[in-house]
Amino acid sequence: MSESQNDAQAAPLRQMQLKRTFSQSTKSQEERVKQAVVAEAFSRGMWGALYGTVAGSLGMLAAHRVNFMGVRRFSVSVKTGLIVTSAVTPFWLRGELTLVEGRDHPERFVSDAQHKEHASKPKGLAPWQHALNFVYDNPFQTWGAIVIPSYAAIFA
């Protein structure tokens, strides 16, 4: 047999192995529940980060406007750090609490895992996945959209 014929026969075999390796049917119920818990923790964490960012930004803007406790003396780095901390903390806390809940009560996430397993066809990307793809594809636009209004609010 020639080398090209060997490659032609090996290619479908490799494709079959990849399909079998990444197939949902080969995952155990425990792995599907773990994936559901992690996905839920990420989702809850992102919502917490969104709420924290909005609250922290509005709080810093209000504190700067009225010079609450001399906040105008703070450097830009301190003000930005306070806003970022108000986003990271809820992300971490909500994500961690969801992971602990999933460890202690996995049955709460079983219906999510079974629902995803029995889905008839993929429906495309979720809105948060589109948002993350946009951030990945346009990092400087995203940075500008977040930082420029924040700096404008701080120095206004």
Image (cartoon, helix red, strand yellow):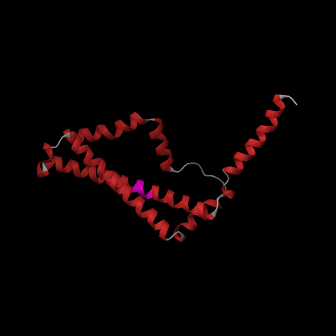
Q: Is residue 26 above or below residue 125?
A: below
Q: Is residue 156 in sight in this rendering? A: no
Q: Position of residue 90 (x, y in %)?
A: 35, 57
Q: Tell whether 153 sits left or right of 140.
A: left
- Residues 136 and 92: in front is 92
Count of numbered circles in the view? 0
Image: magenta residue range: 43-47
Asked whether residue 83 is drawn in magenta, I would say no
Front position in the image: 94 or 5: 5
| In the image, farthest residue toward the right | 1
Instruction: Locate residue 69, reporting x and y percent.
Output: 12, 52
Please tell me whether residue 104 is drawn above or below residue 57 in the rendered image: below
- Image side of residue 19 versus residue 143, left or right: right
Residue at figure coordinates x 33%, y 41% from the top left: 146
Query: Of 117 and 96, which appears nearest the observer?
Result: 96
* Quadrant in the picture for the C terminus: top left
Q: Is residue 94 above or below residue 104?
A: above
User: Which quadrant is the N terminus positioned in?
Assistant: top right
At x 77%, y 43%, the residue is: 13
The secondary structure that most of the magenta stretch takes on is helix
Question: Looking at the image, which residue is at 54% across and 71% down?
Answer: 107
Residue 52 visible in image = yes
Pick the front one: 74 or 68 = 74
Give x and y (percent) for residue 21: 68, 50
Identified at 49% across, 42% down, the residue is 133
